[in-house]
């Protein structure tokens, strides 16, 4: 039994062999009921905890169980943001060579269609995927769930989980996560903070241009079909997306989440998804030891968290000069990133990220008890503070749409639906 569970662990998860002592520690920490702060690693409380600390030291335990993520489906969003429950937007990685001199500035003013970021889509695309794939989900989880539930504890976007993983190291930006319990499942949807909205509405021209560079790099190294080549002369349209939907488990939390995938390996012999997926990134070229250290300490943390979660094994990075020309291309294997950073003093640790995320999810489970899609528990965090929450009924924060609630609440067994 233990052997089977071990085999299904995330391939990049460190093996500590100390799962049992982790469990004992959790049991020990559950003693006493006086504190109203959620104790990291602890489980049971006499009263509902009011806050959760984000101090790194509290999360330096053994790496929690993180099962190898399994792709349960995918969907695509076209150039007008229309949803399709298929892989039509999946692109194929095409190696540009080690120093390709790609001009990322090209097309910014004449061949760029930018998604309207003021339109808040919340979990809608993922919810639509769930409705259209209930039968598949139900049969996967039938053993553990009644017919009308999903059989998972949490539904969310990968990006929201990435923010949770990096929280113990984040010093700049806070977050707001809205949570509702419905049909026994906890749905987590991010709300834009006031500070993030102000930043978004006041980006400099340089910042806007640099954001375009990331998408332009994708265009230079992605082909639409397995036998075609990239078209650097086409339009960059950020409405288009391919998203994977994965299921996994972090400690005792069953997760279903979706994340955008940039492209896949075109070799037909490559392993099945998500192991064939490739994440693309751009970054400023590294010229000094200080720049290398900053890259390891800050950028690799975000890159690692984003790809580790869905089990994407590698990142292809284009390093660009000040004028937006890619001067070198390097591959980073997610499983080797912890080795790369090990010489940095007081650096981030994968175990802290995963344990904080796991404890935050436990905190949410202990707080969000009432099953009501119109009730939102708003979890708020600012750097150097604890996570706190407030409760809102029928407010601007309600995010589960009526069409989803109605369809899910209909008592029809998904297996007998037409
Ligand atoms: P880089 O990855 O080269 O930075 P992703 O890498 O997640 O696939 O995102 C693709 C591009 O979208 C990024 O390219 C960046 O240009 C832009 N982008 C992603 N997240 C962003 C954010 N939070 N703010 C601004 N731009 C972002
Ligand atoms: Mg990318």
Image (tube, rainbow, N blue to C red):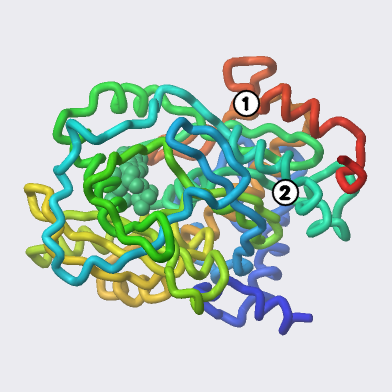
- In the rendered structure, find residue 153 and report the number of the disc placed on it: 2
- In the rendered structure, find residue 399 and report the number of the disc placed on it: 1
Q: Position of residue 78 (x, y in %)?
A: 48, 38
Count how many numbered circles sit on residues in the image: 2
- Classify the position of the N terminus by image quarter: bottom right
Could you tell me if residue 116 is visible in this image? yes
Q: Position of residue 274 (x, y in %)?
A: 54, 65
Q: Position of residue 237 (x, y in %)?
A: 35, 37
In this picture, is 65 found above or below 84? below
Residue at 55% from the left image edge and 31% from the top image edge = 122
Nearer the observer, 326 or 196: 326
- In the rendered structure, find residue 418 and report the number of the disc placed on it: none
Residue at 81% from the left image edge and 49% from the top image edge = 135
Residue at 30% from the left image edge and 74% from the top image edge = 340
Q: Position of residue 291 (x, y in %)?
A: 14, 60
- Classify the position of the C terminus by image quarter: top right
Identify the element where label 1 is drawn.
loop
Q: Residue furthest top?
A: 395
Side (left or right) of 227 relative to 289: right
Dot 2 surroundings within 10 Å: few (below 14), some, or many (20 or more)? some
Side (left or right) of 277 relative to 10: left
In this picture, is 87 found above or below 331? above
Could you tell me if residue 171 is visible in this image? no
């Amino acid at each position: 039994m233990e052997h089977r569970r071990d085999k299904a662990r995330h391939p990049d998860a460190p093996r500590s062999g100390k799962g049992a002592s982790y469990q004992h520690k959790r049991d020990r920490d559950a003693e006493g009921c006086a504190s109203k702060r959620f104790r990291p690693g602890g489980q049971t409380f006499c009263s509902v905890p009011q806050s959760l600390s984000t101090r790194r030291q509290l999360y330096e335990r053994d790496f929690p169980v993180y099962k190898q993520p399994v792709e349960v489906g995918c969907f695509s969003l076209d150039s007008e943001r229309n949803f399709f429950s298929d892989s039509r937007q999946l692109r194929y990685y095409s190696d540009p060579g080690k120093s390709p001199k790609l001009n990322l500035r090209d097309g910014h003013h004449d061949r760029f269609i930018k998604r309207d970021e003021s339109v808040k889509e919340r979990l809608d695309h993922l919810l639509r995927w769930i409705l259209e794939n209930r039968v598949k989900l139900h049969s996967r989880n039938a053993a553990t769930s009644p017919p009308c539930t999903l059989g998972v504890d949490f539904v969310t976007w990968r990006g929201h989980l990435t923010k949770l993983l990096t929280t113990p190291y984040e010093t700049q930006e806070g977050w707001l996560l809205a949570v509702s319990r419905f049909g026994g499942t906890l749905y987590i949807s991010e709300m834009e903070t006031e500070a993030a909205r102000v930043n978004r509405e006041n980006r400099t021209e340089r910042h806007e241009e640099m954001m375009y560079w990331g998408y332009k790099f994708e265009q230079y190294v992605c082909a639409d079909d397995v036998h075609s080549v990239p078209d650097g002369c086409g339009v960059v349209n950020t409405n288009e997306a391919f998203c994977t939907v994965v299921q996994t488990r972090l400690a005792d939390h069953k997760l279903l989440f979706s994340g955008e995938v940039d492209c896949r390996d075109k070799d037909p012999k490559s392993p099945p998804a998500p192991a064939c997926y490739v994440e693309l990134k751009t970054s400023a070229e590294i010229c000094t030891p200080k720049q290398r250290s900053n890259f390891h300490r800050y950028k690799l943390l975000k890159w690692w968290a984003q790809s580790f979660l869905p089990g994407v094994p590698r990142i292809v990075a284009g390093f660009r000069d000040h004028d937006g020309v890619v001067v070198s291309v390097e591959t980073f294997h997610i499983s080797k990133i912890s080795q790369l950073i090990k010489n940095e003093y007081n650096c981030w640790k994968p175990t802290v990220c995963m344990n904080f995320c796991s404890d935050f999810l436990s905190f949410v489970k202990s707080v969000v008890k009432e099953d009501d899609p119109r009730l939102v528990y708003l979890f708020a965090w600012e750097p150097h503070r604890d996570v706190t929450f407030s409760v809102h009924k029928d407010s601007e924060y309600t995010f589960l749409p009526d069409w989803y609630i109605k369809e899910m609440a209909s008592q029809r067994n998904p297996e007998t639906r037409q």
